[in-house]
Image: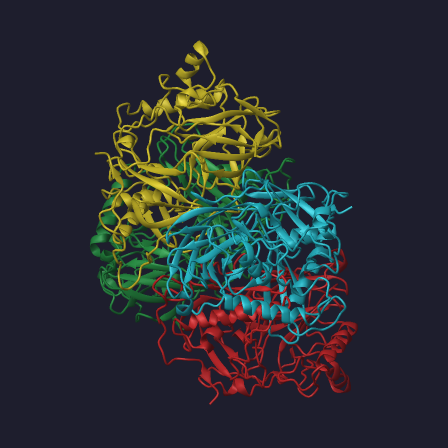
Chain colours: A yellow, B green, C red, D cyan
Amino acid sequence: METLIKVDVSEVPEKQDVLHNRWHPDIPMVATVKPGDEFRIECVDWTGGQIKDDDSAMDIQVVDLSKVHYLSGPVAVEGAEPGDLLVVDILDVGVLPTSEWGFTGIFALENGGGFLDQHYPDARKACWNFSGIYANSRHIPGVEFAGIMHPGLIGCLPSQDLLDTWNKREKGLVDTDPTRVPPYATLPYADTAHMGRMKGDARDAAAAEAARTVPPREHGGNCDIKNLSKGSKVFFPVYVDGGGLSMGDIHFSQGDGEITFCGAIEMAGYLDLRVNIIKGGMAKYAVKNPIFMPSPLEPNYTSYVMFEGISVDEQGEQHFLDATIAYRQACLNAIEYMKKFGYTGEQAYAILGTAPVEGRISGIVDVPNACATLALPTEIFDFDIKPNADGPKVSIPQGIDLAKAV
Amino acid sequence: METLIKVDVSEVPEKQDVLHNRWHPDIPMVATVKPGDEFRIECVDWTGGQIKDDDSAMDIQVVDLSKVHYLSGPVAVEGAEPGDLLVVDILDVGVLPTSEWGFTGIFALENGGGFLDQHYPDARKACWNFSGIYANSRHIPGVEFAGIMHPGLIGCLPSQDLLDTWNKREKGLVDTDPTRVPPYATLPYADTAHMGRMKGDARDAAAAEAARTVPPREHGGNCDIKNLSKGSKVFFPVYVDGGGLSMGDIHFSQGDGEITFCGAIEMAGYLDLRVNIIKGGMAKYAVKNPIFMPSPLEPNYTSYVMFEGISVDEQGEQHFLDATIAYRQACLNAIEYMKKFGYTGEQAYAILGTAPVEGRISGIVDVPNACATLALPTEIFDFDIKPNADGPKVSIPQGIDLAKAV
Amino acid sequence: METLIKVDVSEVPEKQDVLHNRWHPDIPMVATVKPGDEFRIECVDWTGGQIKDDDSAMDIQVVDLSKVHYLSGPVAVEGAEPGDLLVVDILDVGVLPTSEWGFTGIFALENGGGFLDQHYPDARKACWNFSGIYANSRHIPGVEFAGIMHPGLIGCLPSQDLLDTWNKREKGLVDTDPTRVPPYATLPYADTAHMGRMKGDARDAAAAEAARTVPPREHGGNCDIKNLSKGSKVFFPVYVDGGGLSMGDIHFSQGDGEITFCGAIEMAGYLDLRVNIIKGGMAKYAVKNPIFMPSPLEPNYTSYVMFEGISVDEQGEQHFLDATIAYRQACLNAIEYMKKFGYTGEQAYAILGTAPVEGRISGIVDVPNACATLALPTEIFDFDIKPNADGPKVSIPQGIDLAKAV
Amino acid sequence: METLIKVDVSEVPEKQDVLHNRWHPDIPMVATVKPGDEFRIECVDWTGGQIKDDDSAMDIQVVDLSKVHYLSGPVAVEGAEPGDLLVVDILDVGVLPTSEWGFTGIFALENGGGFLDQHYPDARKACWNFSGIYANSRHIPGVEFAGIMHPGLIGCLPSQDLLDTWNKREKGLVDTDPTRVPPYATLPYADTAHMGRMKGDARDAAAAEAARTVPPREHGGNCDIKNLSKGSKVFFPVYVDGGGLSMGDIHFSQGDGEITFCGAIEMAGYLDLRVNIIKGGMAKYAVKNPIFMPSPLEPNYTSYVMFEGISVDEQGEQHFLDATIAYRQACLNAIEYMKKFGYTGEQAYAILGTAPVEGRISGIVDVPNACATLALPTEIFDFDIKPNADGPKVSIPQGIDLAKAV
């Protein structure tokens, strides 16, 4: 497989012009391919090397989130025009020989936050070892699982119109509570923008309006869909000539929701891709957001303990068909269950973020309660986590935990 | 299998005292079993026979939703006490020989509504034929799928404390917008309450405060989780002596979310159950909502087209990590896609509600956008619904549609 | 579902003219259907009621195998002609309310035998209880599994030419060792032939040449393929006008190979079928034996202990690429493994015959050894049967065993 | 992952002393590891580089089969003793950057042969391209599948006793027909023996009795079990101190049976392993042949066309419960079916050998016919290979075929 884009994980990302960390239609293409081509793209981890393989979460606590995500690209595909669908076969996802490890962070409430930041407000970190297809962590005993490797972030460059739409609507949301911590959204911020090969005034002007990379949007982007895994086929809307496919934020594994925010097993790595075009595909198939077909090679766990949650929040307040709150309750229920087997809350939280956990919207019409379910695979534990008449046994060595920031 | 509770689908439910349609701790047990027992419970359909197997949706339009759901029970389990977990093996779910058909309704916006009621505000109905394990409909050509049969509603009686909590919090929500159509929640309503074998003043007093059955709650209840299917094992919290297990709302099949509200393939039927008790199980396993282990016998479709949705609504407004809106967008995207193959919007909507569709919370931390995905199995269609370079072909006979209310 | 053929399990099969127990082109059709029709066929168990739900294997020891299998049919399909393919959707398989139990026999070496008859030469019986989709046995503790219900035997009537071919080649084999016990094959035997509605001289002439039902042959017949389960679609060659589809030998569950011969969970029951025709399909698709597409609803066990066997027999003799001997070694290896957990050999043998065990031809070219594998699902046991560093624990109550013939 | 054994695919294997091509207890260990260790082993392809990535099968025709298989090892595990089980986690299987391709050969009848050598007696070759997890071939259009990567050959060194047993029984078989082509078995042959680091007289003496590597035997060896794939856990009997684990014959993918003999997608590659020991495990678990637990990461194809075969051979002769002949008929039936869509027989034969085809022993007691089934996944083809009323369409470009030897 020919490597189209190479990265250097020992170099700062700002010095690598095949990377960028904002979305803008004018970011110059760094490579061009033809329909039918297969090629390899290397990627740094989403933070660009800010996080280390050690036993302190200080790096998580002080991470500069204005810099994320560092993406490889954009790649132009000959003949791709606005309105087309870019068909991307994610042929493989792999680890770089120069960076064979991963990390999961729980961001501090005041710097990043996460799905359960009201419950787990302090910075924490778990480092992961890769044993072939399996991941395990010295910070989380008793669990090992087959990875479902995928890019957390992949998509084409937006048009100027689409970019303007994003900026307007996201600013509108921020404006409803501008001092919120964490903020409702992150708006354009030129200082730390890495605009790839853009230079000078053009770079500065674009950087001032370029969209941040955290949210998933119409083009895909940071969807964090664990099922965009190796072997899947994705159909991306094209908005600019050539498409401009960029990608990064590679995950060794992730649970549905990626709930700790830095919640997958984050890593540098590579993607092997094949690209094709469906001319006029957006209109032909009424595609607004990307569609995809999952891989035949996802981990095939079938024994689960499943947790339910409804849209009544932790304070007992009733919300109307709020699937987000329902899923939060399911997550909290799963964490309390796992704690009975000896895990700390933070360990359980990190397992939900990283293991191949299924998060489902099970009922969404039974007013006023949405019902969400979370499926925890039992086969990933080296002890029996299924409920039985004898009650749970503490099966995890005590005293081991995620790394702290002190 | 011994039948513990028999129903008569040709008789009105009000005349059958093994049924009830409200939750209250004092509803008398109609049968008693021992741990380890296996038995059959028959159930009427959730509307108690209001909907007919014909080609008019008038019955859907005028359905009396103050009467639903008619449940069979409560069943007492010897030795079950508050704080225990009632372990229920759902050994089988089946069709009654006297009622071999099912229906799916799209409720009118002003009487019931549904997940997409702003888009599909009119009453519609599809009737389903059961061909063994498969379902098909004269109102929706081109699709046939293996059912994932389950009770939409099952759970134990609440304690008085829990009931009071429910009533207080749901009234609190309704009070925020008391004239909303459809209402935010349905509050106790004595007139149409069927309190089982309660009589006289006690019945009237209980009926005035008994909880409606639509929402899923701490005890489980109307969760509409398609994975509570035949072969699953469920662990229910117990709140009253004997437990008081009631159930109904049997579905031949359902997609995640049951999005048309009357959205599964609704039917009368039977459940074969085995019950056991984990003493003190709620505390032992930190169980607040039911937990369960899924069946080894769910339909095993693996080829999917998957649709993404983000929490930007149909008007382009940005919402904060709202998984409900994100899933609605994924549903709308799937419907528009299916329309390209010749389905009407209502047909596509009904397919999403009934077929074994997976609805996932894929990303829930990438502020401000939640990302939900909907997986549509391709093998259930008798034509090729996968995207390809040639574009979609209209494959559905035109002129056939769901029944209307005129 | 309309019942096309009814049986009476309390009546001897000889008195029921919708049954027959031989293959012959002239057996009269007992019902006629049209392409597209759906209908129910009831079946007696394969022995026609010779085996009882009790704790003695005397019935197994003295079973009259010249009478098996009792089949329901033949059914004519309008328009089916020789050379066509009859497309049969096995829509459902179920239990008769009048006969809710099943049995597994180990036949005595001198009356029937089985795959391991040199090791387990005595008659034994296990009776099975059906708990919804699950089967369990008072004779085999510690195991319960979801059934993979299917007809052991189904196919169309042979033409006279095909019948003659069968008789000639099977007699040829028997003639190589006519006194072997058990015999190499069972040849036509008029005395106990049940020729359906044939009468008089025609019946006698046909009975004298009608093929026995035990072997699978070109038309399908007694294939005992566990994957012809509810939800599968089978394409049968047609040899006579109308096809003449007959069936029986219903199994609640079976492992690959059905190794105890009476080895599945045998039962009376019903089949729901849908039939269609592919005109000239045999030539179009080069079909000599039936082909089929499996069901989306088979039990989805994924955790297995797998056993290997090679074509060196129990005496250490080397055989050339003999997959039969290799599979026998894999079976024997699995039995010895299971005995370490407390099972008797006969119990382990019966589990391999009945549980959803996968038997694979893994290597068939590495001269001189074939390699076969047997996959035993671990989730069907209520104890941990996986190997670990501590060694096996006896987990089965001792003193319980299959019924004997004394 | 630390690389314990490195190979050079551009060097002849005879010059690499970490390789050997015979089994003998005295082959010196080339590396030592501890229980719990994880490490990488590189392997050359099974022929040691005799086959080239070109469009002539001359190399297949003249291949020197006295040299195969070249294995990496043996590896000693500290503390392993005869009677133990060596627990090997196959953590990963991968491609070497220096050799990113694979091949499938049909051996000539007079030099190697194969399962269908009477039907396809001439040498042929297909070369395979690896597109990430997928394989495709310029010689076989229309098909692409996810690989199920595994070592075809892995096991521990035999004891002298075991070696003597092998030699005696295999010679016994050859002696029954010493001039057969191909021979019944390949006996020790010192000339081309590569005995690793053995030297001088000791080498010569050992080479004269060292077992050839083709057959699977008690220790495992060349089992060609496709399910020993990345992520599986294997329990190997130990016969000599240290165990002496050797391996090779890496396959990118293979169908059950590996029917063309050189029938998988053969490649050089690496294995990542983790080893542990169960002391006295052979007796504890009654292990004679290796046992294993399959991976959670095998390709999850579920739509199949399945073919049946019975133990009546191509000449119409009846055989007694011969699963080998039954599987051969199933293979031949599948090939004839595929030819209707435009494949040549050789292409179809090669697909059965390489794609994730399931080969099952379905019925093994219904005297005199064994029944085997072959499951061909439909999703691997880029056209619809399922049967339907319209009949098959030729979907494969004509004129393309496997490479020939001329």
Residue D54: x and y in percent read 69, 40
View extreme (top): residue:
A201
Residue D16: x and y in percent read 55, 46
Count all numbered tags in the image, as a single digit.
0
Classify C289 as above or below A80. Answer: below
Residue B395: x and y in percent read 64, 43
Q: Quadrant of residue A262?
A: top left
Classify D125 as above or below A260. Answer: below
**C232, A123: nearer the viewer:** A123
Q: Quadrant of residue A203?
A: top left
Judged left or right of residue D263, residue C282 is right
**B223, D133: nearer the viewer:** D133
Indicate the quadrant containing the N terminus of chain D: top left, top right, bottom left or bottom right. Answer: top left
**C331, B157: nearer the viewer:** C331
Judged left or right of residue A228, residue A375 is left
Is residue C271 visible in the rendered image? The answer is no
View extreme (bottom): residue:
C406
Classify A10 as above or below B101. Answer: above
Classify C10 as above or below D42. Answer: below
Residue drawn at x 26%, y 31% as measured from the top left: A58
Is residue D323 visible in the rendered image? The answer is yes
Judged left or right of residue A185, residue B143 is right
Residue D211: x and y in percent read 58, 62
